[in-house]
Image: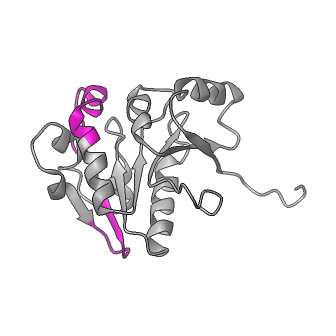
Amino acid sequence: QFSLKLNQPRSLLITSANAREGKTTVSANLAISFANAGFKTILVGTDMRIPTLHKEFNLPNDKGLSNYLNEEVEWKEIIHPVTVENLSIIAAGMIPPNSAELLSTPRMVSLVQALLREHQIAIFDSAPVNLVADTQIISPLMDGVLVVVSSGSTRKGDIKKIRESLQYAKVMGFVMNMLFKNTESY
């Protein structure tokens, strides 16, 4: 935030190379941090294949992004307020058979625009980039992408593959996760 003061990104996509690298936890913590700093923040679960964001906040997942993209509800109907001041959540919703197709619709573009009119920061918790095409589809809509890498499990080849997959996205950096401090070494 400080290093990009003039062009502070308002829409951030959080992804990882593979499953179970902590992207949803990083997304949730980042959203809470922005909200606690006074920014009106929305956190959106765009991983519709294995949705977990709703579990982080103990929310229902019966109506969410997939329902909006399938034109079953309007976007304001799927916003969940949470106990954190300045933070709202949109869960992924019911698992659709065609998440990549849904994310590539004009309705997704409209949603991003609408959320940015109503919020100062929009964070999108996305599917792992090396497993499915969903992240590649929506990353060009974002001001920036943060990639979560897991210490000890994300391999160099995974990171190279991410850079190739997200060549049209604005990759802002990487977040090292699951790094266990060894007291004997730096």
The answer to whether residue 151 is above or below residue 168 is below
Depth order, front residue of 83/118: 118
Decide: is 33 above or below 55: below
Q: Position of residue 98 (x, y in %)?
A: 25, 26
Q: In this picture, which residue range is highlighted in magenta?
A: 81-109
The residue lying at 23 percent from left, 27 percent from top is 97
Q: Position of residue 70 (x, y in %)?
A: 15, 36
Question: Is 90 inside the magenta-drawn segment?
Answer: yes
Image x and y of residue 173, in percent: 63, 44
Residue 137 visible, this orientation: yes
Q: Can you say which quadrant of the picture contains the C terminus?
A: bottom right
Q: Is residue 50 magenta?
A: no
Locate the N terminus and report the quarter of the image it occupies.
bottom right
| Left or right for 57, reference 23 | left
Q: Residue 26 location in percent, x, y?
A: 52, 54
Say whether residue 92 is visible.
no
The residue furthest left is: 72
Toward the front, the furthest residue is 6
Residue 68 lies left or right of residue 169; in this view the side is left
Q: Is residue 58 left or right of residue 28?
A: left
Q: Nearer the viewer, residue 121 or 186?
A: 121
Q: Residue at x 11, y 39 (%)?
A: 71
Q: Is residue 44 above or below residue 168?
A: below
Q: Among all residues in the image, which is located at the extreme right? A: 184
Q: Residue at x 90, y 58 (%)?
A: 184
Quarter of the image for residue 95 reads top left
**Which quadrant would residue 40 be assigned to in this image?**
bottom left
